[in-house]
Image: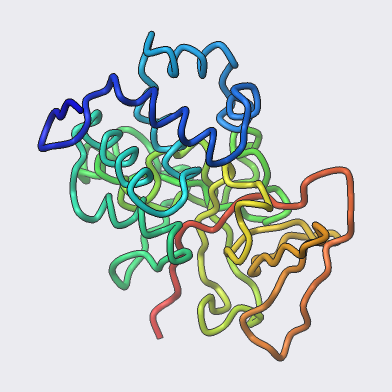
């Protein structure tokens, strides 16, 4: 086995990791390609060693990997590829899916109005190490992050880049009500990863899901028969039973959140 920078495997071994990940997830090349929004040919070229995945794709693969060595390796290699190797980045990407979503570090979160978010502002205030994630006015507008329009956006939430390396697949939603207290209080902001939509992989995870005419954030419980339940943290609220439907009601997994300071 050949090792590269700081003891981690060199890129040619990525193909073995991807093949093993497909085996663990029981996915064909075509199924993995659909989940990553790439072509089957691209996955085949990764596995044949003809070209390595981009850092963005490596991070997506890491999120699909089960907790443990493989997830850590894929994440570390992606970060080495883009020159980002801080402990905060690793904690955000690795722990965010292993023990459930985590709170953003620090007690303050900045929201910038759309009119103020510009390259000039970034340059003046040194915000290049932050990602700007759209905060939606109406959670019902959530879906594919690429599909939202400027009229849907209340502002942009600035979070450390490591917590949101792929901004095109993230949106932020405000939590309304007390069904998720004390984890998510009324007015909390949740970061939703729209690449994480497979109910089978989100069992007992915090998700944003369509329910009736709106969107709600709850714990997802997947029953043995495939039925989906949305479970509140506050037990004074009822568990919601998602109706069986042709479409997937899961908008995305909640990767991080922020509560207003008391």
Q: Quadrant of residue 187?
A: bottom right
Residue ranking furthest to the left: 6
Labels in figure, total: 0
Is residue 48 depicted above or below 217 in this figure?
A: above
Measured as percent of width and height from the top left, residue 74 is found at: 34, 38
Q: Who is closer to the viewer here, 236 or 221?
A: 221
Quarter of the picture holding the N terminus: top left
Measured as percent of width and height from the top left, residue 92 is found at: 34, 55
Is residue 231 depicted above or below 163 in this figure?
A: below
- Tell whether 193 sits left or right of 10: right
Residue ranking furthest to the top: 50
Give the residue at x 52% y 71%: 188
Give the residue at x 24% y 28%: 81
Measured as percent of width and height from the top left, residue 17 is found at: 39, 31
Quarter of the picture holding the C terminus: bottom left
Q: Quadrant of residue 36?
A: top right
- Tell whether 2 sits left or right of 158: left
Q: Quadrant of residue 121?
A: top left
Q: Who is closer to the viewer here, 224 or 36?
A: 224
Q: Who is closer to the viewer here, 133 or 97?
A: 97
- Tell whether 176 sits left or right of 21: right
């Amino acid at each position: 086995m050949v090792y590269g920078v700081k003891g981690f495997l060199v890129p040619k071994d990525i193909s073995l990791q991807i093949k093993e990940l497909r085996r663990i997830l029981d996915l064909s090349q075509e199924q993995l390609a659909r989940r990553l929004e790439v072509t089957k040919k691209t996955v085949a070229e990764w596995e044949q060693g003809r070209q390595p995945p981009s850092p963005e794709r490596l991070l997506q693969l890491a999120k699909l990997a089960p907790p443990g060595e493989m997830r850590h390796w894929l994440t570390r290699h992606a970060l080495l590829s883009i020159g980002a190797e801080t402990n905060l980045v690793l904690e955000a990407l690795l722990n965010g899916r292993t023990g459930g979503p985590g709170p953003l570090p620090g007690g303050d979160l900045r929201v910038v109005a759309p009119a103020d978010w510009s390259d000039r502002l970034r340059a003046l205030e040194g915000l290049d190490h932050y990602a700007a994630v759209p905060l939606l006015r109406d959670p019902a507008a959530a879906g594919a992050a690429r599909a939202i329009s400027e009229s849907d956006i209340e502002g942009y939430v600035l979070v450390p880049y490591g917590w949101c390396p792929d901004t095109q697949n993230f949106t932020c939603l405000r939590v309304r009500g007390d069904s998720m207290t004390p984890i998510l209080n009324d007015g909390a902001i949740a970061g939703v990863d729209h690449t994480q939509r497979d109910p089978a992989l989100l069992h007992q995870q915090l998700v944003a899901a369509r329910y009736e005419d709106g969107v709600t954030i709850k714990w997802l419980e997947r029953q043995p028969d495939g039925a989906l339940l949305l479970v509140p943290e506050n037990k004074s609220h009822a568990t919601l039973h998602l109706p069986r439907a042709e479409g997937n009601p899961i908008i995305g997994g909640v990767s991080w959140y922020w509560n207003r300071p008391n």
